[in-house]
Image: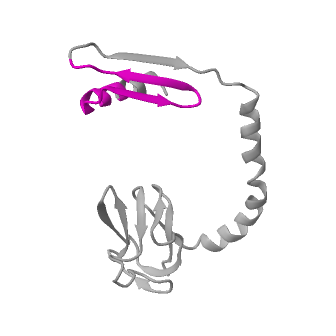
Amino acid sequence: MDLKDIQNLIKFVAKSGASEVKLETEDFKITIKTGSGEESTTYVQQVPVSTPMAPVIQAQPAAAPAPQEAAAPASSAEESKYITIKSPIIGTFYRKPSPDKPTFVEVGQDIKEGDVLCIIEAMKLFNEIESEVSGKVVKILVDDSSPVEFDQPLFLVDPS
């Protein structure tokens, strides 16, 4: 956390009306106290991080992806002819407008530009995700009611 993040946190706490906020991570502890007639006080304490742990944590993930990389070129060559429709926002992915309604699209279904493919709920707002291409849905990459990240692939579409 850098100085700018700490300043933004202080401003947020001051606007929220909270009298005290404590934030602790592996690297540091922050306590922000505000009072009605008192000055705001901020305490930042750096906690030493042991260096032997860092290489061990980095070495394990680096070794794990190697077997997956060998399988990736075969499937990526097959999928390169398809267009990937990605999530424009972070939220929860839904294939249906409501639990009692049918899904928006199925694998093998032809879609046109502007067709609604799914809904992504973000902060209690339901955002319809429309197709930007015409073609046939080849694969749905996300399960219903699953969380999705920004730019996460949702659908594969064959434009031919």
The picture quadrant where one finds residue 67 is bottom right
Image point (50%, 86%), residue name: 108
Question: Where 97 falls versus 36 (above or below)?
Answer: below
Q: Is residue 63 magenta?
A: no
Question: Where 60 falls versus 68 (above or below)?
Answer: above
Q: Is residue 19 magenta?
A: yes
Residue 8, position as x, y percentages in the image:
35, 28
Query: In the depicted view, which residue is nearer to us: 76 or 62?
Result: 62
Residue 13, position as x, y percentages in the image:
31, 29
The span shown in magenta is 9-36
Residue 28, position as x, y percentages in the image:
54, 25
Residue reaching furthest to the left: 37
Colour scheme of the rendered structure:
one colour
Residue 137, position as x, y percentages in the image:
48, 80
Query: In the depicted view, which residue is nearer to us: 115 or 81?
Result: 115
Image point (37%, 29%), residue name: 9
Question: Where 138 falls versus 83 (above or below)?
Answer: below
